[in-house]
Image: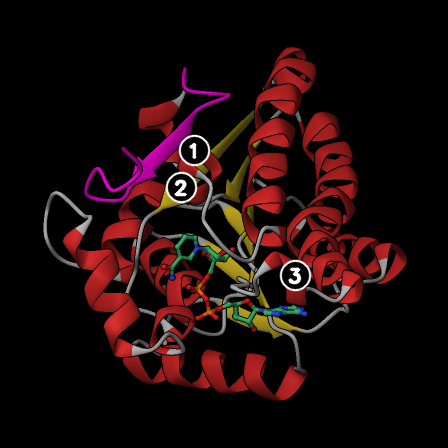
Amino acid sequence: MLKGKVAIVTGGTRGIGYAVVKKYLENGAKVILFGSRQETADKAVASLKEENASWEVEGMAPSLADAEEVAEAIAKVKEKYGRLDILVNNAGISQSTKLYDYDPKEFEKAINLNVNAIFYAIQPAAKIMKEQGGGCIINTSSMVSISGQPAGVGYPASKFAVNGITISLARELGPDNIRVNAVAPGVTRTDMVAALPPQVVEGLVKTVPLRRVGEPEEVANAFLFLASDMASYVTGEILSVDGAARS
Ligand code: NAD
């Protein structure tokens, strides 16, 4: 479904991002995964190559807090591969601190990675996509971008912003043939969820109509659909993959 396409996936070293990288490779894309450290990026690449030595995948580790570093990394991808078809903004952190205990710096941390870094990546990527006649950007939102959550307000605040960026840029970049969508996962089996106390996860599962957590691969399927030509007329969409937990 993605034969010959070149994709960047941020936070591709584990969890949902790793599942997206694998799904894209299985479908013929060349993938550059961005990790927070070169060492973890290389480790993820090695584990993917172990599964299939012919997959074209490499790891980079620009600081997502630095707009210039992100732009330089994206320029290097364009230089090496000649194009950039798909940008997946997936790196993210969640928070669960109660309002009265919040350090403003912690709030800023969620906004810096979950919102600002997306902007840093989209700007240079969209310029390349415009020049080559089109492309596709997929952001990672969350079910909390619809329902909010009763703690860690920085997290839902950042994901509401992700939806705002997605819908607005779909409108702005549509004339350049750049589609902009988001996937909004529910409770998904990754390190992010493993970090929660088991009773919290149990409580969350009870609120999911499908009565289970989602698997990273089930979320990755949505990223595949949105990146593929099957979604050629889909843009500005926030696609929930959450067992209807948002309701
Ligand atoms: P994870 O913690 O397993 O993976 C997060 C990824 O982001 C990792 O690859 C990590 O290296 C990267 N990352 C974290 N901080 C970084 C930084 N400062 N710089 C660069 N990279 C950084 O989490 P996950 O569950 O796979 O989450 C991936 C995305 O899915 C996030 O945007 C998250 O908000 C979203 N999401 C997850 C769930 C869930 O239940 N797991 C639900 C809704 C949305």
Mark earlier in primary sequence (3, 1): 3
Q: Name the residue that disc number 3 marks.
A: 100
Q: Name the residue that disc number 2 marks.
A: 184
Identified by mark 2, the residue type is Ala
Identified by mark 1, the residue type is Ile
- Camera sees residue 225: no
Mark earlier in primary sequence (3, 2): 3
Judged by its main secondary structure, the magenta piece is: loop
Q: Give the Cα separation between the discs numbered 3 and 2.
A: 28 Å
Residue in view at x 54 percent, y 45 percent: 156
Q: Nearer the viewer, residue 167 or 233?
A: 167
The residue furthest front is 100
Q: 57 above or below 116?
A: below
Q: Name the residue that disc number 1 marks.
A: 146
Mark 3 or mark 2: which is in front? 3
Mark 2 or mark 1: which is in front? 1
Residue in view at x 46 percent, y 50 percent: 150
Identified by mark 3, the residue type is Tyr
Q: Which residues are magenta?
A: 233-247
Q: Quadrant of residue 230?
A: top left
Q: Give the Cα separation between the discs numbered 3 and 1.
A: 23 Å
Q: Secondary structure at mark 3?
A: helix
Q: Quadrant of the N terminus?
A: top left
Cβ of mark 1 under 8 A from ligand 1: no
Residue in view at x 67 percent, y 17 percent: 176
